[in-house]
């Protein structure tokens, strides 16, 4: 058994079932193991940013790692933006980066680079070189252990070509299960005491607190204490819809966050960080917790977050109280002008049961979440790290992880151009992904930011750098070229008809919205 085969068999033994890849020469022996180890499914992508984003979407929905296979430092660099998003989402990923053969590195071949420095920015907790075929299996076990955490993280394993092809591979046993998270009783008691004072309070929920059970406990706590529930602005995954507790996200703009927190005396963090401004702005605060507000930590990423919320509800005598869940209800299909609001209404009218929504729509998708609150339960995946181009790859990964669930990808036009190669993988695999693409011919968010940062000028030459016209992009043509069925909507009635057709069409499809 060579090193590559032992690596593949070790990953399978640990529970890794899928590897999203864009390989090169140094990785060919690992690619060859796909025939010898059929339990490991290889998924080809045309760009490394698709592979890394797909692994992120897979991990968020499967709650276990996928692997990636990238080609040396430049390939890792191409995948870096969506590994950044995965790091912020705390998604478990075993990130395999091929390298030159150990004896070849001294020759400084054209693709030689400092892989470790590139990897550390997105994989700060684990970067390891596989040094020999006899130990690469053990290295993989440690990478898997690091990836699953808790908390989840990107664990990077660098795989030299000769370690792959040389014989001597060993398949070690999988690691023991990760340690059972705990509930800190002292924190629970302290938070209960703070909330029991009756002062204005906000309970800020992060990734681990946004599943149905945790949300129900949080709702009981809020009902017993009068506290307000909120979530971080860009959580990794939120379960929402009829029968699930609804929670408002903190606003994107810092001044809106400051307004919503004004007068709050207690901010309780539940797997969340204190809110800060997304960017720095002249004469505006970066730290958004109001002066005089006490910050309390109930549970962090390594704790039993749902258990901590349940214990807090019990401490307050609210564990048997009903949770305030969202009522069932859908908007009517809209008519007339096609706007972001009417698009949201159509999505609310037609969103399938148990859908997964990958949201990279930036400004245009804001109404979609509002209008789908009463739909049947579904999961919403947000742009955790702010690196655009996440939506289509995350949709790929979510569809691979949950082949029995429909996926809707909400996509902005500018962001879509980063990772359009995702559509080819969707078509190749026949994934049930419906892309709703908001085409306003502009980086709309940047037009707003140009004003907000107080930049002088902002005339036609500046705004031309934020315009996506001349020529207009033919997204339907691009989608069809990559294997998708596509429609173009210019009115609300057309969009309702086209969205219904897309959701009913097997395989991937696109509905382009002209705003």
Image (cartoon, rainbow, N blue to C red):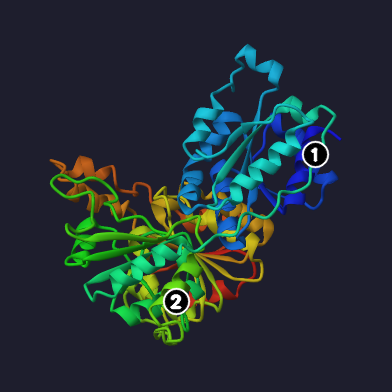
Figure disc tally: 2
Do the residues under discs 1 and 2 have CB atoms within 8 angstroms? no
| Picture quarter with the C terminus | bottom left
Residue at image coords 70%, 40%: 140
On screen, residue 510 versus residue 405, left or right, reads: left
1 or 2: mark nearer the eye: 2
- From where the camera sits, is residue 358 visible? no
Q: Position of residue 259 (x, y in %)?
A: 18, 64
Q: Position of residue 268 (x, y in %)?
A: 33, 64
- Please tell me whether residue 332 is drawn above or below residue 397 in the rendered image: below
Please identify the residue farthest to the top as the structure is shown.
Answer: 107
| Picture quarter with the N terminus | top right
Label annotation for residue 217:
2
Residue at image coords 61%, 55%: 179
Q: CA distance from mark 1 to mark 2?
A: 44 Å
On screen, residue 236 versus residue 194, left or right, reads: right
Q: Which residue is mark 1?
A: 6
Crowding around mark 2 (Cα neighbors within 10 Å: few <14, some 14 to 19, many 20+) is many
Q: Nearer the viewer, residue 402 or 294?
A: 294
Crowding around mark 1 (Cα neighbors within 10 Å: few <14, some 14 to 19, many 20+) is many
Q: Position of residue 498 (x, y in %)?
A: 49, 73
On screen, residue 485 versus residue 171, left or right, reads: left
Under circle 1, the secondary element is helix
Label annotation for residue 278:
none
- If you read the primary sequence from the N terminus, does the residue marked by circle 1 or circle 2 appear first? 1
- Please tell me whether residue 500 is drawn above or below residue 64 in the rendered image: below
Under circle 2, the secondary element is helix
Q: Position of residue 430 (x, y in %)?
A: 67, 62
Residue at image coords 23%, 76%: 198
Q: Nearer the viewer, residue 381 or 442?
A: 381
- From where the camera sits, is residue 471 visible? yes
Residue at image coords 29%, 54%: 445
């Amino acid at each position: 058994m060579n090193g590559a085969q032992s690596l593949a068999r070790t990953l399978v033994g640990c529970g890794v079932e899928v590897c999203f890849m864009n390989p090169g020469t140094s990785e060919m022996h690992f690619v060859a193991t796909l025939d010898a180890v059929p339990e490991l499914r290889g998924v080809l992508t045309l760009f490394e940013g698709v592979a890394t984003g797909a692994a992120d979407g897979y991990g968020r929905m499967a709650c276990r790692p996928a692997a990636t296979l990238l080609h040396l430092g430049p390939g890792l660099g191409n995948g870096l933006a969506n590994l950044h998003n995965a790091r912020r989402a705390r998604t478990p990923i075993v990130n395999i980066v091929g390298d030159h053969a150990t004896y070849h590195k001294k020759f400084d071949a054209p693709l030689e680079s400092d892989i470790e420095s590139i990897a550390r920015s997105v994989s700060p907790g684990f970067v390891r070189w596989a040094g020999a075929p006899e130990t690469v299996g053990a290295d993989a076990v440690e990478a898997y252990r690091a990836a699953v955490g808790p908390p989840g993280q990107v664990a990077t394993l660098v795989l030299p070509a000769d370690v792959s092809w040389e014989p001597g591979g060993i398949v070690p046993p999988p690691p023991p299960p990760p340690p059972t998270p705990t509930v800190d009783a002292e924190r629970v008691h302290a938070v209960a005491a703070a909330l029991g004072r009756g002062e204005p309070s906000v309970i800020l929920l992060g990734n681990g607190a946004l599943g149905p059970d945790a949300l129900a406990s949080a709702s009981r706590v809020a009902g017993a204490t009068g506290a307000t529930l909120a979530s971080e602005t860009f959580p990794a995954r939120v379960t929402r819809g009829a029968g699930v507790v609804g929670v408002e996200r903190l606003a994107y703009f810092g001044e809106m966050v400051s307004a919503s927190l004004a007068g709050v005396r207690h901010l309780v963090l539940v797997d969340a960080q204190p809110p800060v401004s997304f960017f720095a702005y002249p004469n505006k605060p970066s730290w958004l917790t109001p002066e005089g507000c006490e910050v309390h930590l109930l549970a962090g990423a390594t704790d039993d977050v749902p258990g901590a919320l349940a214990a807090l509800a019990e401490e307050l005598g609210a564990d048997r109280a009903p949770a305030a869940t969202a009522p069932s209800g859908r908007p009517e299909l809209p008519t007339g002008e096609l706007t972001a609001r009417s698009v949201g209404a159509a999505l609310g009218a037609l969103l399938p049961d148990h859908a997964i929504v990958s949201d990279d729509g930036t400004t245009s998708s804001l109404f979609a979440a509002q209008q789908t609150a009463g739909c049947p339960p579904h999961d919403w995946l947000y742009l955790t790290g702010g690196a655009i181009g996440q939506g289509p790859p995350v949709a790929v990964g979510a569809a691979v992880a949950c082949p029995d669930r429909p996926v809707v990808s909400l996509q902005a036009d500018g962001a879509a151009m980063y990772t359009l190669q995702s559509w080819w993988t969707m078509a190749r695999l026949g994934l049930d992904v419906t892309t709703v693409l908001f085409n306003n011919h502009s980086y709309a968010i940047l037009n707003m930011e140009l004003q907000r940062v107080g930049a002088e000028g902002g005339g036609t030459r500046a705004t031309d750098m934020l315009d996506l016209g001349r020529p207009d992009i033919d997204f339907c043509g691009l989608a069809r070229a990559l294997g998708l069925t596509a429609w173009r909507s210019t009115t609300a009635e057309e969009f309702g008809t086209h969205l219904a057709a897309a959701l009913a069409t097997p395989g991937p499809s696109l509905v382009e919205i002209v705003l």
